[in-house]
C-alpha cells in the first residue's frame, strides 16, 4: 500500500537535529501503511545513525552509501524506495504533522505534476539573525512564496526548453521536495555517468548546490509541471554557523559556480566564457563595485560575483 517513500540522506548528522526530524515523522497524520522511511547513511564517520530507533515505523530501513556525495546518496535511496513518489527530507527538517497527508492529496489532484514543494521556514535556535540576512534565505533553502498555489507550465517541443525560458521562481528546494520516482530514476541514469552532474550537489565539505536546479530543468523538459503548495510546511533548522558571514560567502560562491554549470548543461547560459587570466581584474572590479570594505552582505555578494566568474571560465 506504500505510495510515498520518505528519504533522508545524511552525512555525520547532528543527533539533536536528526531526532527532531524523526520525531516529526513519528506524529504524521498519514497512516503508517501509506508511506515508508529510508535513511541513507552517506559515508558518515560518526556513530549517530547507530543510535536511531525505528522500531515505531513499519516499512523502514537504514542503508549505507559508502560513496560520498548527495547525488550518490539520493540515487541509493531511490534504488531502495518502493513508493511511486519520493519525499526528500534533510536531516535538519521538521515536517508539519499534516505534510505527508497533504502530499498525497496534492498528487491525487494534480496528475501533471513532476515535482513540487512548499514553505520552509527557519528555526534559528534562539539566535536573532541580522536584518540583511533575509536576502540569503533562498540560498539557505528557506522559501515562502505566500499563501497562493503556484504551478509553472511550459510548452515543450522535442524535449527542448522554450526560447523565452526562465527558471521558475517558485521551484522547490531540496528540503521537503516531492518528486515522481520514475522521473528521478530517469535523472539518476542521466547523471550517474556524468562527472559534472555528479558533482553539482553537496559532497564532503563542498557547498555546491546546483543539483536541484538541474533536476527541475530536466523535469520541465519532460513536460511535467512544477508546483508550490503553501499547505506544505516544514521548519528548517539554521544553526549559528550557517549565519556567519564566512559560511554565507562560501555558499554564495559555490552556488554561483554550480548555477553557471547548470545553465551550460542545458545550453541556456546567457553569458560568454571568460579567460582565466582575466579573473584577477574581474574580481578586483567587482570588489570595488560591491564596496566590500563595508563587510557583511557586501562581502557575501562579492563572493557570489567571484563564483560566477569562476563558473564562466569552465564553459
Image (cartoon, grey):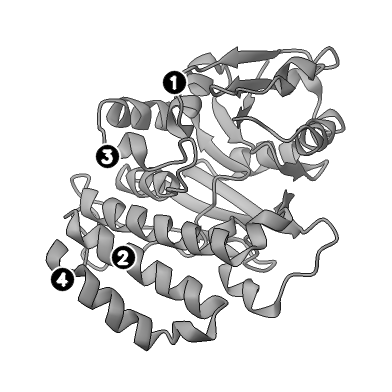
Q: Is residue 4 left or right of residue 69?
A: right
**Residue underneath mark 1:** 67
State which mark lies toward you, 3 or 1. Answer: 1
Mark with earlier residue (3, 4): 3
Q: Measure how far apart labels 3 and 4 are at the Cα level.
A: 24 Å
| Tag 2–tag 3 contact (CB < 8 Å) | no
**Residue underneath mark 3:** 196
Which of these two is toward me, 111 or 222? 222
Which of these two is toward me, 283 or 119? 283
Q: Is residue 147 left or right of residue 200?
A: right
In which quarter of the view is residue 146 placed? bottom right
| Tag 3–tag 1 contact (CB < 8 Å) | no
Question: Crowdedness of circle 2 by 10 Å Cα count: few (<14), some, many (20+)?
Answer: many
Residue 73, image x, y percentages: 50, 26
| Tag 2–tag 4 contact (CB < 8 Å) | no
Q: Measure how far apart labels 2 and 4 are at the Cα level.
A: 13 Å
| Tag 1–tag 2 contact (CB < 8 Å) | no
**Residue underneath mark 2:** 308
Question: Quick check: can you spot residue 196?
Answer: yes
Amino acid at each position: 500500500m506504500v505510495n510515498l517513500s520518505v528519504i533522508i540522506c545524511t552525512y555525520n548528522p547532528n543527533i539533536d537535529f536528526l531526532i527532531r526530524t524523526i520525531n516529526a515523522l513519528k506524529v504524521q497524520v498519514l497512516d503508517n501503511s501509506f508511506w515508508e522511511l529510508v535513511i541513507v547513511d552517506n559515508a558518515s564517520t560518526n556513530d549517530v545513525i547507530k543510535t536511531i530507533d525505528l522500531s515505531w515505523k513499519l516499512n523502514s530501513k537504514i542503508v549505507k552509501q559508502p560513496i560520498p556525495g548527495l547525488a550518490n546518496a539520493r540515487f541509493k535511496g531511490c534504488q531502495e524506495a518502493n513508493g511511486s513518489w519520493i519525499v526528500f527530507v534533510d536531516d535538519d527538517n521538521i515536517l508539519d504533522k499534516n505534510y505527508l497527508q497533504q502530499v498525497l492529496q496534492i498528487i491525487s489532484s494534480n496528475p501533471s505534476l513532476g515535482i513540487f514543494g512548499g514553505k520552509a521556514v527557519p528555526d534559528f535556535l534562539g539566535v536573532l539573525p541580522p536584518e540583511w540576512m533575509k536576502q540569503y534565505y533562498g540560498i539557505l533553502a528557506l522559501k515562502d512564496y505566500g499563501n497562493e498555489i503556484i504551478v509553472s507550465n511550459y510548452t515543450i517541443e522535442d524535449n527542448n526548453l522554450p526560447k523565452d525560458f526562465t527558471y521558475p521562481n517558485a521551484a522547490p528546494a531540496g528540503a521537503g521536495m516531492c518528486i515522481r520516482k520514475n522521473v528521478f530514476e530517469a535523472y539518476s541514469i542521466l547523471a550517474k555517468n556524468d562527472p559534472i552532474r555528479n558533482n553539482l550537489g553537496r559532497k564532503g565539505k563542498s557547498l555546491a548546490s546546483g543539483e536541484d536546479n538541474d533536476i527541475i530543468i530536466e523535469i520541465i523538459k519532460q513536460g511535467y509541471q512544477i508546483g508550490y503548495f503553501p499547505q506544505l510546511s516544514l521548519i528548517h533548522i539554521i544553526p549559528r554557523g550557517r549565519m556567519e558571514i564566512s559560511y554565507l560567502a562560501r555558499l554564495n560562491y559555490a552556488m554561483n559556480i554550480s548555477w553557471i554549470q547548470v545553465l551550460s548543461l542545458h545550453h541556456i547560459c546567457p553569458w560568454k566564457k571568460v579567460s582565466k587570466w582575466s579573473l584577477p581584474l574581474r574580481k578586483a572590479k567587482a570588489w570595488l563595485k560591491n564596496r566590500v570594505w563595508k563587510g557583511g552582505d557586501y562581502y557575501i555578494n562579492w563572493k557570489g560575483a567571484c563564483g560566477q566568474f569562476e563558473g564562466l571560465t569552465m564553459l
